[in-house]
Amino acid sequence: MALILPFLLAFAGGATDFARAYQASLTLESGVRNAAEYVATNSANAGAAATDARRVVCLEATGVPGFTAGTGVNPNENCTAPAVSIDSFSITTVAAGDPMGSVHVNATLAFNTLVPWPFLPHDGWTLSADATYSVLRGR
């Protein structure tokens, strides 16, 4: 038993860290995808697009390890981590006369393991997600 216990504890710790990283990655990717859809559908300009994208990603990532709330009235809506950026935003008119919104959203989040595993970096893992969305507005 004394020989097996350290291996069982290491396996449980590894599984916990893997599960945390996987959950954080899925949450970040889902938040970025939802932010891209919201921005392409509702935002009026690039400034509003950046604010809306940050708000959506921050609200969805509040439970993720590495989340850092901002300051002010709604600290969870203007978080400092994850870092959210808009690579491109445009509203164009298509042949039918309807406006089409397009956006590309990026987010990155620093992730740290609970245990400093050998051969794995304890600090400095960066989880990232990006999504592109285009939609005809007003339909």
Image: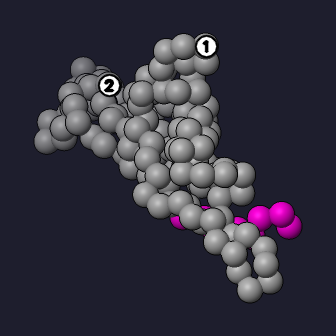
Q: Position of residue 42 (x, y in %)?
A: 72, 52
Q: Residue at horizontal 49%, vertical 31%?
A: 64
Res 22 visible:
no
Q: Is residue 35 left or right of residue 114?
A: right
The main secondary structure of the magenta stretch is: strand
Residue count near mark 2 (Cα–Cα under 10 Å), binned few <14, some 14–19, many ≥20:
few
Q: Position of residue 43 (x, y in %)?
A: 66, 50
Q: Position of residue 111 (x, y in %)?
A: 34, 34
Q: Is residue 58 left or right of residue 127?
A: right
- In terms of depth relative to the viewer, which is nearer, 52 or 22? 52
Q: CA distance from mark 1 to mark 2?
A: 31 Å
**Residue 56 lies in quadrant:** top right
Q: What residue is disc 2 on?
A: 114
In the rendered view, tell whether residue 70 sits above or below residue 26: above
- In terms of depth relative to the viewer, which is nearer, 27 or 53? 53
Q: Magenta segment range?
A: 131-139
Q: Is residue 44 left or right of residue 137?
A: left
Q: Residue at horizontal 39%, vertical 49%?
A: 128
Q: What residue is disc 1 on?
A: 73
The label shown at residue 64 is none
In the rendered view, tell whether residue 48 sits above or below residue 9: below
